[in-house]
Amino acid sequence: MVHNEHSPDIVQAQRDWNRTYSALAQAPAGSNTRLRRRLIDLSRRLVQDVPRERLADLRQQAGKES
């Protein structure tokens, strides 16, 4: 069940996290520092702003609207 209570900026942060994660998976090992730092920053924001029990809803919402 998806709750549409996540703010648009949080949904966008989750989309950015998804894109960054994919880019990091494809990046050469020696050139991924910027992507790793971006992923850490986005992860920190999501953990601070979204309760753990709502993360699955957020991921689902971000996937549907992308």
Image (cartoon, rainbow, N blue to C red):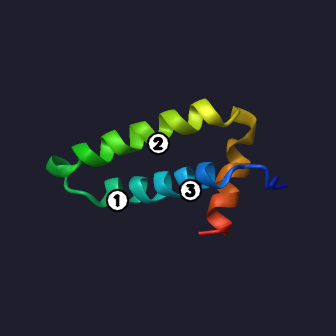
Of the image marks 1 and 2, the number of the one nearer the N terminus = 1
x, y (%) of residue 5?
79, 50
Circle 1 residues within 10 Å: few <14, some 14–19, many ≥20: some
Q: Point out residue 21 in the picture as x, y percentages from the top left corner.
A: 41, 53
Looking at the rendering, in which quadrant would you find the C terminus?
bottom right
Viewer-nearest of labels 1 and 3?
3
For disc 3, the marked residue is 12
The residue located at (63%, 35%) in the rendering is 49
Q: Hey, which quadrant is residue 25 in on the image?
A: bottom left
Res 23 label: 1
Please identify the quadrant where the N terminus is shown. Answer: bottom right
Mark 1 near mark 2, Cβ–Cβ under 8 Å? no
Residue named by callout 2: 42
Q: Residues within 10 Å of mark 2 (few under 14, many from 20)?
A: many
Upstream in the sequence, badge 1 or badge 3?
Answer: 3
Label 2 is placed on what type of residue?
Answer: Leu
Total numbered badges shown on the rendered structure: 3
Of callouts 3 and 2, the N-terminal one: 3
Left or right: 19 with respect to 6?
left
The secondary structure type at the circle numbered 1 is: helix
Give the amino acid at mark 3.
Gln
Residue 40 badge = none
